[in-house]
Amino acid sequence: MRARVEARPSLGDDEIWFLQHPPVFTLGQAGRREHLRDPGDIPVIASDRGGQVTYHGPGQLVVYVMLDLKRRGLGVKRLVHGLEQAIIDLLTDSGLEGVRRPGAPGVYVDGKKLAAVGLRVRRGLSYHGVAINVDGDLAPFQRIDPCGYRNLQATRLKDLGLDWSVEETATRLLVPLAARLGTPEASIVEAERATLADIIGAPTRVGGDVARVRG
């Protein structure tokens, strides 16, 4: 992902990737290892995104947004707001209330964190994005201080009464996400295999399914 952003021509297509990761803890640029309380056998990989520590794994929808912010008239704060609002819109359409928390980017339901946000911007191009807990195992979050907050609990769509697969969640999210990011005509045009190394610049190669959107 980072290599694609660095190699991208100035007028290249914007892309949104939808994928799942194998189990992994990632440390953002501000990450402090004391927030990794008991990683056990789950790999820990440094990432160049913003933020602290989080967990990725099967049953979690990860959405990476590679956008030309100037072309879209977006600043970083507006991009974060748009990503959060797309998830809030998704919840609202299903009769649930998602909220923001000042100073702690993401989306929360009843005080528990449903979605995390972590971004990086290089040469005016964004990458990384959001992770939404769908139906995966939440136990690994108990091994860390999620996003640097001790005792912050995680939740997932399944526990909120939404029995969706990761694929269905991605499909449902596409419309509000495209609208909030100013891409009403976006559509999925291809799917491919990607590796964790491609996405966060790590030496370990681990598979993840990717759907790419251009618009």
Image: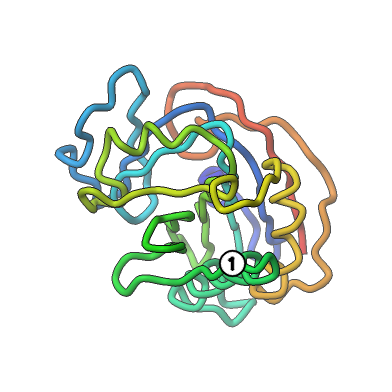
Binning the other alpha carbons within 10 Å of mark 1 as few (below 14), some (14 to 19) or many (20 upward) gives some
Direction from residue 138 to residue 191 in the image, left or right: right
Q: Position of residue 125 (x, y in %)?
A: 53, 63
- Which residue shows up at 19% across the image and 33% down it? 37
User: What's the coloring here?
Assistant: rainbow
Residue type pointed to by label 1: Leu
Task: Give the x, y percent position of residue 48.
Answer: 37, 47
Residue 21, placed above or below residue 214 = above
Q: Which residue: 18% across, 44% down?
A: 32
Residue 198 versus residue 29 in the image, above or below: above
Q: Quadrant of the C terminus?
A: bottom right
Q: Is residue 213 left or right of residue 207?
A: right
Tell which of 198 and 3 is nearer to you.
198
For residue 14, above or below residue 21: below
Q: How many marks?
A: 1
Residue reaching furthest to the bottom: 73
Front residue of 91/106: it is 91
Q: 134 left or right of 111?
A: right
Q: Nearer the viewer, residue 82 or 3?
A: 82
Q: Position of residue 190 (x, y in %)?
A: 82, 44
Q: Residue furthest left?
A: 34
Quadrant containing the N terminus is top right
Pick the front one: 199 or 105: 105
Which of the 4 image quadrants contains residue 120? bottom left
Q: Which residue is mark 1?
A: 96
Residue under the image location 58 percent in, 51 percent down: 64
Q: Secondary structure at mark 1?
A: loop
- Picture quadrant where residue 88 is located: bottom right
